[in-house]
Image (spheres, rainbow, N blue to C red):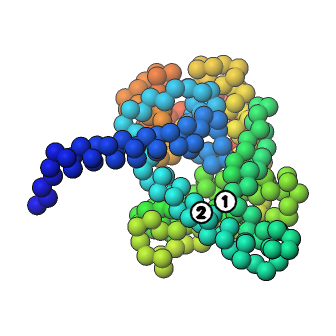
Amino acid sequence: MSTISPRVAAQQAELDALIEGAITNAPRSLQTRIGPSELGIPCDLRIGYKLAGHPAVNVSQPLAWKPWIGTAVHGQLEELLARANMARPEWAETGADRYLLEERVTVGGVNGDDISGNSDLYLDGVVWDWKIPGGSTLRKYKASGPGEQYRVQAHLYGLGWERRGAPVSDVAIYFLPRDQEWKQRYLWSEPYNRAVAEASLSRADGIAKLVTALGQAAFPLLRRRESWCRSCPWLRPGATDLATGCGGDPDALTEAASELSDLIAQ
C-alpha cells in the first residue's frame, strides 16, 4: 500500500496544475474555428454548433489527456523526420526536404472563410496523417476502416496539397498504437479523390449558410448522427431545447426540413 505524505500530496497538486494547465491552454484545446479534422464529422448538428460559435455545454468532458498524448507522439515523429531530412547528403547542398512536415495548407472555403490545417506529412505525392488510438478503437479501425471523419480529413489534406500545386496520388492514415506493441500498428490508404473533399466542403458550406440565415432556429433542422457523443462539447443529456445543448439520443432524431435540405450537401 502506498503511503502519501502531505508533502508528496502537495507536490502532486502542483504537478497536476501544471499538466492540466498545459493541456487546457494548448492550441488544439483553444481552437475556435472549424478545421479539416472536423469537417468529416457525420453529425450535421455538431458542425452547426461549431460554425455558429455556440458555447460548449458539456460539463462532463474529460481533460484532453489522450489527445495530448497524441500531440506528444506527433511532436516526436516530426523531430525524427526533421533529423532524417538533415541527414540526407543532398540536404547540406540544397536544403531541400524529403519529408514535408506540419505544413499549413488551405483545403478550401466555407461560407467565405478559408479552412486551413497542419498536414502531418507529405512524401512524394502521398499525404500522411498520424492517429494514436487506444486498443479497442484500433481494433475497430482494423475491422471497419478509418470511419467517415478520418477518411474525409485525409482527402481534405490531399486537396490542400493539390491547391498548393503539389501532385497527390494517395492519402494514408497510419494508426500507431497508444497502449499496445508496435506490431499492432495499422496502415489504411486509398487513392486520393478530390470529390470526397469537395463534398465535405459543400456540406459544411450549406450548414454554415443555414445557421447564418436562421441562427439557433437552424439547430432543429440539422440532422444528428452518433459521433463520439460523450466527448461532444454540446452534449447535454436530457436537453429538449437544442439552443441549450443536444440530448444526444440518435434514436429520437429528425431529418432536416425538406424545403431546406438543398442547402446541405448529401
x 47%, y 68%: residue: 177
Residue type pointed to by label 1: Asp
Q: CA distance from mark 1 to mark 2?
A: 7 Å
Q: Is residue 261 visible?
A: no
Q: Is residue 187 left or right of residue 135?
A: right
Name the image quarter holding the C terminus: top right
Q: Secondary structure at mark 1?
A: strand
x 72%, y 33%: residue: 206
Residue 137 drawn above or below residue 6: below
Q: Secondary structure at mark 2?
A: strand
When asked about the image quadrant of residue 259, the answer is top right
Circle 1/circle 2 CB separation < 8 Å: yes
* Residue 232 pos. (x, y %): 48, 39
x 68%, y 67%: residue: 82
Query: Residue beneath label 1, please?
Result: 120
The residue lying toward the viewer, choosing from 119 and 46, is: 119
* Residue 56 pos. (x, y %): 49, 30
**Number of other residues with Cα within 10 Å of mark 1, as a class: few under 14, some 14 to 19, many 20 or more:** many
The residue lying toward the viewer, choosing from 70 and 199, is: 70
The residue lying toward the viewer, choosing from 197 and 9, is: 9
Label disc, if present, on residue 130 of the rendered structure: 2
